[in-house]
Structure formats: structure tokens, C-alpha cells
Image: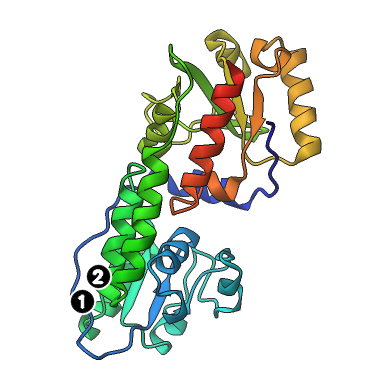
Amino acid sequence: MKRAADGFGGMRRRILGLAAAACLCAGPARGAGTPPRIVTLAPNATELVYAAGAGGAIVGTVLRSDYPPAARAIPRVGDGIQLSEESILALHPTLVVGWQPSDGTRSLAQHLAPLGVPLIYADPKSLDDIPALVRDLGERLGTRAAANAAARGLERRIHALRPAAPPPQTVFIEIGADPLYTLGRDPLTNDLLARCGGVNPYAEGAIAAPQVSVESVLRLNPRVLILSPYGRDTLAVRRAWWSRHGLAAARAGRIYAIDPDLLHRPGPRLVDAAEAICADLRDSR
């Protein structure tokens, strides 16, 4: 089944942020009996905290944190790239959760350290890391039962992913059309593709979100093309565009779209993206 998606905001952040690398770093747990006050610095961090059962303790977040719907009412402390340190400190957080290190988070960490407030990063490198992060947050925030239940549900779905029949299919993921961008050395997305029976032909590139030429894609001749982010009309337009340029996958109808908020936010809903992409690759057979 063809899938459509809207919005270009997630793609821009993906391109800007993919070159960095981090992990959920150790930090002191909150004191016994101290109600948590959490600030999240990325949409995926917000979704992970909610999955861990502590969404109600988030007191500040960034502009594009819009899922689950309750997150839209949380005060904003920046756009994820530019952060208001003054606003964050005024919220008196007990924990700050980001995605990847940046100049802004490093500066913020220097101001949080004297207060004993940890800043941790939630940057999964595989699908299995996502439920592990949910469990870790549950331990930190005193929501172990809810976090473990959510993690078990994610693990069941990950283990149930059903790849397409062999051999593996080459999959080109288009994340920008003009200029043409794709995903390259991005371990999380490449792990997702592998579990679905797909291979990213740009996985061994030097960077995580390379700009590529139309000619290089045509030479590689991927069996499947996945577009993100695109709406229904644009999916049809891109199918026609690639067909005119001679891409066999487009002419054969092996072209799909995925919601960018699912694919580009490394949180619990990436499992939704994995299920959709696995279904697309089975359909492409």
C-alpha cells in the first residue's frame, strides 16, 4: 500500500543533525522524593519520555515537539537548534534530555553542571536501542513499571518485523528533491532497512545525509524508492519525474512515501516506520 506524508521541517533537522553522534550518557539520578522536572531538547526525546510514562513531568521542550498531542501544551525553550538557556534554567529542571550534542547543548551543560542537573542524550543506533532507552528513562524517573511495559511492547513489534523474501533489495531513500539528498552513513536507518530485507546503496558513504546526483541514482538502479517527506500530490509528481528520467523502480510502481515524523525522529514511532517500510518492501516483490 502506498503511504503519504506531509511536511519538510523534520527533513531539515535530520540533515543538520545526522553528522553528530552521541549516546544516552550516564548521569546522577534524581534525589529520592524529588518530583522530576524534565526539559526535552528534541521531539524524539519528548516521545521517549512519554513512552517511559513521565510525559506529565516535562516542563519545557522545543518547537517541533508535537507528539503525543499533549506535548503541544508544553512551554517552548527553543527550536532544537537555538536554545534559551535563561528559559531552561528558570524552569528548575532536574533532568534535561537531548538528542545529539551541539554547541547549544554543550553550553547549557556547563550551566547545569554546578546545579547538579544531568543533561543526557538519547541517540539510538539500532531499533533495539529504543526500548532500552525507554527502560533507562523509567529507571531514572521512577516510572519503571510503565516504561518496562512500553519497552516490552516495542520489543515484541521489533522482533515481529517480517522482511521481504531474499535477496536483499536496494532501497534509495529520498529526503530532499532540489537538491537531491538521501540518507547515507546512518546506522539507525540502515539497521531498520536490514531488518526489512533492504540495503541502502549509500550506507558506506562518508557522511550521514549526502547530496547525490540523479545520474548516480540511475547508475545504482535501486529496486525500491522511498520518499520522505512528501504528500499525496508530490508522491505522484515524483513518481512521474523519476519515470521520465528512466528509473525502473518508478516505472514499475516500486515507489513509496513515509511520514517524515516517523522516519526522522529516532524514538518509539520509528518502529511504526519500520513496520510500514517492511510492508512496502514485501509489496515491491
Instruction: Give the colour scheme shown.
Output: rainbow
Q: Please, is residue 128 above or below residue 181 in the view?
A: below
**Rendered location of residue 209, percent (x, y):** 47, 36
Local secondary structure at mark 2? helix
Task: Read off the residue under disc 1.
Answer: 29
Q: Please, is residue 95 above or below residue 271 in the view?
A: below
| Residue at 20% across, 86% down | 31
Q: Amino acid at mark 2?
A: Glu
**Rendered location of residue 155, percent (x, y):** 35, 48
| Residue at 79% across, 29% down | 236
Toward the viewer: 212 or 40?
40
The label nearer to you, 2 versus 1, is: 2
Instruction: Specify whether residue 280 is in view.
Output: yes
Q: Amino acid at mark 1?
A: Ala
| Residue at 78% across, 38% down | 232
Task: Read off the residue under disc 2.
Answer: 139
Local secondary structure at mark 1? loop
Q: Are marks 2 and 1 in contact (CB under 8 Å)?
A: yes
